[in-house]
Amino acid sequence: MLRLKKVAITGGLASGKSSVGRFLKELGAYVVSADEIVHQLLNPTTNLGHQIINLLGHDVVKNGQFDRSAIAAKVFKDPQLLHSYEQIVHPAVRAETQRQYKLAQEQQPREPYKLFVAEIPLLFESGDTAFYDAIIVVDTDPKIARERFIQATGHTAEEFARRMQRQLSPSEKLQKADYILHNDGDLTELKNQVTKLYNTLISSE
């Protein structure tokens, strides 16, 4: 079986991780997103869903679905609750990511995948680095990231700061990176960097 190189994308809030993942997918990588996996797994009827309800209460479920804003409102205000929530969610995301990796190897399209890429905002915090062959950190000026976050979510600067506090600092993440992408410019600049990095990654098998 073909062994795909496993690459993780991480970085701070609104750094551009999803854009990097999208560009890598366009170039031919098999890409998964931890946030999308969480969204798919958050079902009140599953075992994972029952664990979350037991932890957070039934009021995080509305119209038979989890209300992600209600979950966020609870966990981001209580560090211990957030830790307990992540202890439930992180292993489930890890298992699904590994399942997707096996799937990517087994179900090769006509043009075979050359990379398996996972976008994981809390890669270092969840302790999942050992699974990956290379780690990309997307670096962005904090002021730019804050403005992007506010524009994209409607949240406040205070909420941006609170969420960033639960992560390793950008400088700590950069020290742990194998590759760094700088995203202070426009998407064209970022795409050019991603294309160069993709070619480097697939040529260093």
Image (cartoon, rainbow, N blue to C red):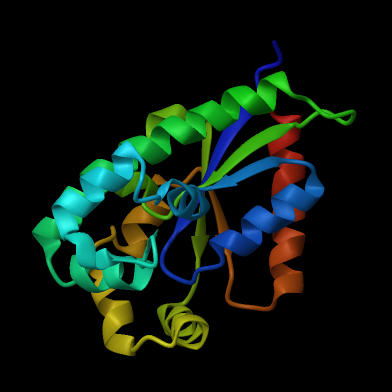
Give the left or right position of residue 2, taking residue 157 as reference: right
Q: Residue furthest right?
A: 110
Q: For this view, does 114 lie left or right of residue 95?
A: right
Horizontal arrangement in the rendering, residue 190 relative to residue 71 (left or right): right
Rendered residue at 24%/75% (across/down): 162
Residue 127 in view, yes or no: no
The image shows a total of numbered marks equal to 0
- The C terminus appears in which quarter of the rendering? top right
Residue 54 vertical position relative to residue 112 in the rendered view, above or below: below
Above or below, comparing residue 77 to residue 200 in the picture: below
Q: Residue at x 77, y 62 (%)?
A: 192
Q: Is residue 84 left or right of residue 90?
A: left
Picture residue at 47% right of the left edge, 49% below the top: 34
Q: Position of residue 177 (x, y in %)?
A: 45, 47
Q: Nearer the viewer, residue 175 or 1?
A: 1
Q: Write down the quadrant of residue 80 in the picture.
A: bottom left
Is residue 134 depicted above or below 191 in this figure? Answer: above
Look at the image and tell me whether residue 117 can be seen.
yes
Image position, residue 17 (x, y; %):
55, 60
Query: Residue at (37%, 54%) from the top-left corner?
Result: 173
The residue most toward the top is 1
Comparing 45 with 135, the one in front is 45
